[in-house]
Image (spheres, rainbow, N blue to C red):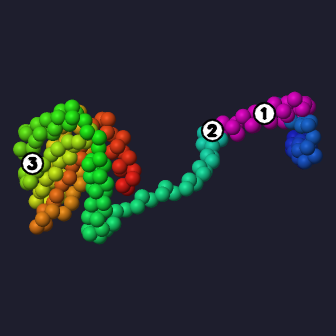
Amino acid sequence: MSKDRRWWISAGAALAVACAVGGVTLLRPSTLNEPGAGMRQVTGADSEARLRDAEAKIEQLTEALGRPTERPAMSAPAPQLSALPEDSSQRQATARKVADNYKVVYDGNARDAVFEAKALRQAERALEAEALAMVSASPRDLSVDCRGQICRLDAEFPNASDASEWATYYVMALGDVLPSSRTFMLPGQHGATRMQLYLFSPKAAGTMQELDRRSW
C-alpha cells in the first residue's frame, strides 16, 4: 500500500474517533494540495467558530425557505342573525307590529309648532321634485303631516316595488331638514300596497334608533 493511501486511512480514522468521543480537538491536513504534509491541530476556538458559521448558514437557509408560522387560534363562529319569517302573512304581521310601534311614538311626540311648520313645508315641496315625475307610478290617497320632530307620509301604490321606488326619490328630495327615514309596506285594499313613511329630524335621530332597537 502506498504511503499516501496509508496517510488518508489514518487521517480518516483519527477524524472519526475524534468526532465520536466529542472531543474539542480535530485533526485535518494542513493543505488539500499536499496529502503528505504535516498535520496541524484545530483548537476549541476554531471549532466554536465553525459551529457559529454553520448556525449562520442554517439561519440563512431558514429565512430563504420561509419560517413556519403559528396556526392562528380558531375563533368562535359568528352568531347568525335571525331571518325574517318566510311566510308572507308572518312578514306582514311583523311589519304591522313595528309600524304600530312607530305610530305610538309619533302620536305621543311633543309638539313643536315652529319646526312642524318648517318640516311640513319641506315635505310638501319635495312632492313637486322633478325626479318624482320620472317614477312610473304615482301615489294615491296621499297625506302628510308633522308632529314635533317627526313627519309621517301615508300613501297607496299598486305594489311594493312602485312604492319603494317612489319613496327613494322622495327622501332624496327632502334635503337635510328630515334626513332620516323608515318605510313600511303594508297590505292595502284590492291587492295594493299601503306605504307609511316616517321622517325624522336630526334631533329625533335617537328616537328612531331606540324604536329600531325595541322593534327588532
Q: Read off the residue under disc 1.
A: 52
Residue 2, x across and y down, in percent: 89, 44
- Going by the image, does 22 lie left or right of 64? right
Secondary structure type for disc 3: loop
* Front in this rendered view, residue 34 or 192: 192
Q: Which of label 3 and label 2 is nearer to you?
A: 3
Label 2: how many residues lie within 10 Å, few (<14), some (14-19) or many (20+)? few
Marks 3 and 2, Cα distance to the nearest angstrom?
Answer: 64 Å
Residue ID for mark 3: 135
Question: For the residue marked with disc 1, what is the amino acid?
Answer: Arg
In the picture, measured across the screen, residue 70 lies left or right of residue 29, that is left
Q: Mark 2 = which residue?
A: 63
Query: Which comes before the other along the chain, label 1 or label 3?
Result: 1
Which amino acid is tagged 2? Answer: Glu
Q: Residue at x 63, y 38 (%)?
A: 63
- Residue type at mark 3? Val
In this image, 136 relative to 87: left or right? left
